[in-house]
Image (cartoon, rainbow, N blue to C red):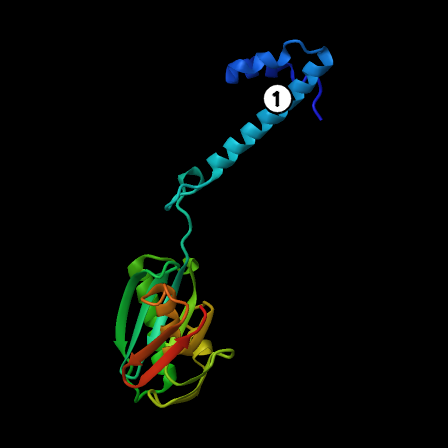
Amino acid sequence: RVGVRDTRHLRRRGRERFPDGRRLYRGRSRAQRRVCDKLACAADVFYKQSHTIEKKQPRAGSYGRRGKELEIMYVFGVDIGGTGVKSGIVDEQGKIVVKSSIKTDRSRDYKAIIKDIGAQLIALAEEAKIPMSELTGVGIGCPGAIDSARGIVDYSCNLCWKNANVASELRKYVDLPVKISNDANVAALGETKFGAGKAYSDTVFVTLGTGVGGGVIIEN
């Protein structure tokens, strides 16, 4: 609700912003002019709000309110293979920020290999100068039969692992959520989301490494 005294200043402001607005008052009674003032007040509020909203919107790119950079989400990506472990830090657009590779050495127990992976991830974060607080988790692709819900490798002939609790073991060195799935499946998902398959709803992906695998994405 708008009172008369709340609208007196609008006549002067209205003439400045809308020079042709004074014709609205010609030939009208005092009551009719008050209605015009209220409408002008409502328009003025809308004008202010629309411009305020427009100013609060961050510029497209990397800056938001007060010129601060917008936060970017980073995650660790780990590909455990029969001969090597490839790891990297990836942003939410699928861009690889930094990456490295270490040997697997399957003759050792899986816990020793996971310890090496933990050290590898910490070194990557230091190299990229990204604090752990800005990393949201670890995604792992591993060959074999994987229990993703429990984070366990039930069996992997490539690595000679059986009932390896990979997620729990890695969290000893990197205090982040850890998700693990079959390497061919996650490779297919990654290629569909960020690679050659992103323009298609159905994708077939084949992996050629120590073993041969594949994944199918349907109705993406």
161 vs 28, left or right, is left
Of the pair 117 and 219, the residue shown nearer to us = 219
Q: Which residue is mark 1?
A: 40
155 vs 126, left or right, is right
183 vs 178, left or right, is left
Of the pair 160 and 209, the residue shown nearer to us = 209
Rendering coords of residue 170 (x, y %) = 42, 75
Of the pair 107 and 90, the residue shown nearer to us = 90
Is residue 56 placed above or below 80 in the rendered structure? above
Check the image and name the residue furthest to the right: 31
Quadrant of image for the C terminus: bottom left
Q: Quadrant of residue 82 in the image?
A: bottom left
Is residue 99 placed above or below 148 in the rendered structure? above
Quadrant of image for the N terminus: top right
- Identified at 43% across, 58% down, the residue is 133
Q: Quadrant of residue 67 in the image?
A: top left
Label 1 is placed on what type of residue? Ala
